[in-house]
Image: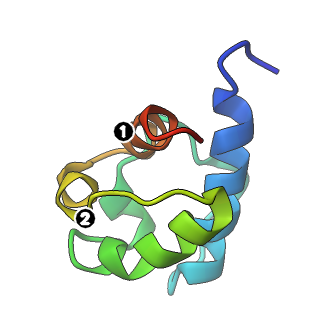
Amino acid sequence: MDADGTSEVLSRLRDVLRESAVEEHDWDAVASETPIESLGFDSLTILDVLYDVEEEFGIALDPKQVVKTRTVGEIIALLQQNGA
């Protein structure tokens, strides 16, 4: 595992996204650089996932910041900045 815990956060985030997704994807192939929109989430639908992400990680995120994210890596960075 990497020193900053990114791989663990990515794994947990993949699980939450998988549970919330409408479309099928190769979730094991989802990486930090994967665009959120390519997974079937846009700025509005990602807000629907926000509650599940907050529950999984036990933190609160600013919806305005979440809407600005474009990649899985940006969500990971946001989670880590907030204590994940």
Q: Residue at x 74, y 16 (%)?
A: 2
Residue furthest out toward the right = 1
Q: Is residue 58 above or below residue 84?
A: below
Residue 16 in the figure: left or right of residue 8:
left
Q: Is residue 14 above or below residue 83?
A: below
Q: Residue 77: x percent and y percent? A: 43, 33
Residue 68 in the figure: left or right of residue 75:
left
Using the numbered discs, state the Cα–Cα distance from disc 1 to disc 2 in whole angstroms. Answer: 14 Å
Q: How many marks?
A: 2
In the picture, the disc for residue 63 is: 2
Q: Pick whichever of labels 1 and 2 is earlier in the sequence.
A: 2
Q: Is residue 25 above or below residue 70?
A: below
Quadrant of image for the C terminus? top right
Q: Residue at x 35, y 49 (%)?
A: 35
Query: Which residue was labeled with disc 1?
Result: 74
Crowd class of label 1 (few under 14; some 14 to 19; many from 20; radius 10 Å)? some
Q: Nearer the viewer, residue 57 or 16?
A: 57
